[in-house]
Amino acid sequence: MAISNVNLIVKKTWQDLFKRRQNLLIMIIVLLFCMLSVGIGYTKYTDNFSTIKQYREEVRENWEHRPDKHPHRMAHYGYLVFRIGHPLSIFDNGLDDYLGNVIFLEAHKQNTANLSEAGGSGTLVRFGSFSSAFILQSIIPLIILFSGFGLIVQEREHATLKIMSVQGASGRELIWGKILGLWFFSLCFLIPVVPVVFVAASMSETTSLTDISLRLSFLLPAYMIYYFFISTLTVVVSANSKTTSSALISLIGFWLLFIIILPKGIQFAAQNLYPSPSRIAFETNLEKDILKSGDSHNPDDPHFKKIKDSLLSRYKVNSTDELPFNYGGFVMKEGEKMSSSIYIRHQKNLQNIYQQQQNLTDLSGFINPALAIKNFSMISTGTDFFSFTQFQKQAEKYRYQMAQHLNNLQIEHISNIKPEKGGPPAIIDHDNWKKFPDFNYQYTPLSDGIKEQSIPGIALLVWLAICIIMIEINGRKLKLI
């Protein structure tokens, strides 16, 4: 294959595409919309961050300034923890709008995340959110199809394919040249967006520049592969169509299939193949298992009565009042340990169901490149479901440590003998609340996200290989007339 011939065809295709004033106008409009979406995303992100920062400070201040109190009362007073999205959610907000951002932490109970953006957005959220990722994943492919549907079939109708063949251009060179020309054209929609996203994400100052650069270095090639597939599909369909109208209709059909039909179909199939329990059913089953294990608030509970008897025997005393530590705190600590292990088991089973649904969606990337790029984009920007589960795990770890810390304070500083009427209450100094650190959410590293969800990236590489095979096959059998 002569590189010079390919270069000439690429140059001619590029010039033909930019000769059309409507293409230049469309590019300007789309880029303006992308910049607008980045601006809106940045404003929304900074507002959310400012609000969360304000509430975090308020929650912490209220916690530290609680009066002298019994530690177990503080454990039930609870604590609010917040999740701030990754700054690259400015580009792709992924699942962030559908998942909760706040969790209320308290003793003996594990609450779900609440206050999602979609929860207060009405039915319009079903149509998707206005973001640069949505434009690049759904709108740009349609523009590529409309720009390139006639690149081969129109040349055949005008009998110029035969002329180029006589001048020395082979079918493979024609296919490669047209695809690369259309691909370079498509990159004009992508390349200008990346530095703007980088600057906007950097201005948020919620993560390092290294992290942002690393994520964008994975994100950019992924979109380039996606656009290479769209360009290849467009030219191959054009090469195998008899008329320009049939080529356009076929390509619109592919767009509807990849962007609308398959994603909705896969989502429906995942929910029906791996149904998840309702929130009420989940919490009911969880509560049943916790009650079966024992009730730490019930002094006559069989499980905790055995613990009581063993402690009395070990320390050779007749009642819990004679133990060298607070018996109530010890029971609460044991109960917290049991309830947390049960919750983790139930949560793991629920996560397995969600993971099965996600695996089906990831595997569908091998039949739909639009799903592959969508999932990989969410992974790269930290707006995927795996990143959310890491927030849940961090919050639960913090909740458990907080509850056990307060239980230890009760064990060490509260007497077993109940205070008499009119006597000093069973409380500890409020300075103890300040000693427990604030919750500090850590973003999920990109390496962990890709390691746990490697299928979308592999699917994109498979589609790249399929593109090359399609080009080689169609280049050899290209009909000139």
Image: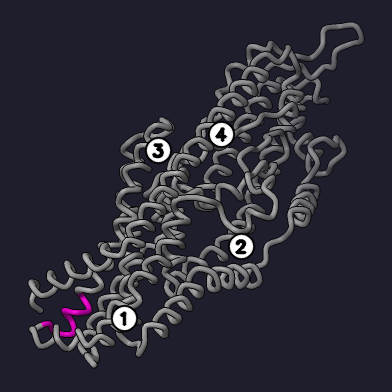
Type of amino acid under label 3: Ala
- Whichever of callouts 1 and 4 sits on the residue coming sooner in the sequence is 4
Q: Which residues are magenta?
A: 169-176
Marks 3 and 4 sit apart, C-alpha to C-alpha, by: 14 Å
- Whichever of callouts 3 and 4 sits on the residue coming sooner in the sequence is 4
Please give the residue where the numbered disc 3 appears in the rendered image: 201
Q: Which is more toward the observer, 35 or 319? A: 35
Please give the label number shown on residue 236: 1
Marks 4 and 2 sit apart, C-alpha to C-alpha, by: 31 Å
Say above or below: 404 vs 18: above
Q: Confirm or deny contact between disc 2 and disc 1 (CB under 8 A).
A: no
Q: Position of residue 149 (x, y in %)?
A: 35, 76
| Quadrant in the picture for the N terminus | bottom left
- Report the mark closest to the observer, 4 or 2: 4
Mark 3, Cα crowd under 10 Å, few <14 / some 14-19 / many 20+, is many
- Whichever of callouts 2 and 1 sits on the residue coming sooner in the sequence is 1
Q: Position of residue 444 (x, y in %)?
A: 45, 44
- Report the mark closest to the observer, 1 or 3: 1
| Quadrant in the picture for the C terminus | bottom left
**Please, what secondary structure does the residue beneath circle 4 have?**
helix
Q: Confirm or deny contact between disc 3 and disc 4 (CB under 8 A).
A: no
